[in-house]
Image: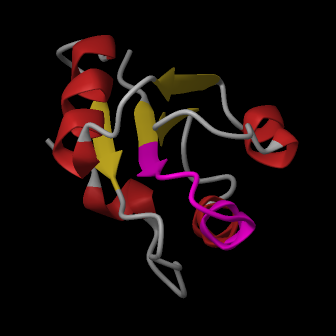
């Protein structure tokens, strides 16, 4: 059965980046089946993000957003819907289920 997998990534330069990532994920709450967050680079792991994620990946190096996308796409099944969002996106009225059509 298909799942909607929501993914995002951030660089742990300051608490600000963790906060905007949290806001991004929270704005899509209830619209995905699994959440994968990639932390691009070593640094403090924000507890709030780790608790939200079904899978929280810490990459030793900053692999950029594209690198995080590649990591996440390897973890999905062929019939899953992957949603890649920049961590500074905030959903106002989009329903992900309406975007995931065959």
Q: Residue furthest bottom?
A: 92
Q: Is residue 51 left or right of residue 26?
A: right
Seen in the picture, residue 11 relative to 34 is either above or below; the reply is below
In the figure, 45 relative to 89: above or below? above
Is 14 in front, or is 79?
14
State which quadrant residue 28 falls in.
bottom right
Instruction: Name the one closer to the observer, 50 or 1.
Output: 50
- Asked if the stretch drawn in magenta spans residue 88, the answer is no
Placement of 18 over or under 39, stated as above or below: below
Q: Answer whether residue 17 is magenta in the image.
A: yes
Q: Which color mode does the image show?
A: secondary structure
Instruction: Specify start and end residues of the magenta stretch as a single range.
Output: 7-19
Q: Which residue is at 27% across, 50% downward?
A: 100
User: Is any atom of residue 54 visible in this view?
Assistant: yes
The residue that appears at 66% across and 64% down in the rendered structure is: 14
| Among the 4 quarters of the image, the one containing residue 85 | bottom left
In the rendered image, is residue 101 in sight? no
Q: How many marks?
A: 0
Residue 36, horizontal then vertical, whole percent: 51, 32
Q: Position of residue 13 (x, y in %)?
A: 57, 59
Residue 94 is drawn in which quadrant?
Answer: bottom left
Q: Give percent across and percent down for residue 76.
A: 30, 17
Quarter the N terminus occupies: top left
Q: In screen coordinates, is 74 left or right of 34?
A: left
Question: Quarter holding the C terminus?
Answer: top left
Q: Residue at x 47, y 75 (%)?
A: 88
Frontmost residue, 45 versus 83: 45
Residue in the image at 42% along x and 28% along y: 3
């Amino acid at each position: 059965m298909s799942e909607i997998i929501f993914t995002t990534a951030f660089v742990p330069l300051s608490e600000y980046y963790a906060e905007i990532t949290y806001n991004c994920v929270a704005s899509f709450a209830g619209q995905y089946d699994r959440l994968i967050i990639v932390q691009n680079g070593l640094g403090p792991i924000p507890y709030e993000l780790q608790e939200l994620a079904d899978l929280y990946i810490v990459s030793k190096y900053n692999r950029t957003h594209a690198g995080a996308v590649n990591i996440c796409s390897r973890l999905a099944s062929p019939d899953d819907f992957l949603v890649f969002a920049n961590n500074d996106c905030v959903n106002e009225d989009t329903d992900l289920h309406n975007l995931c059509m065959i």
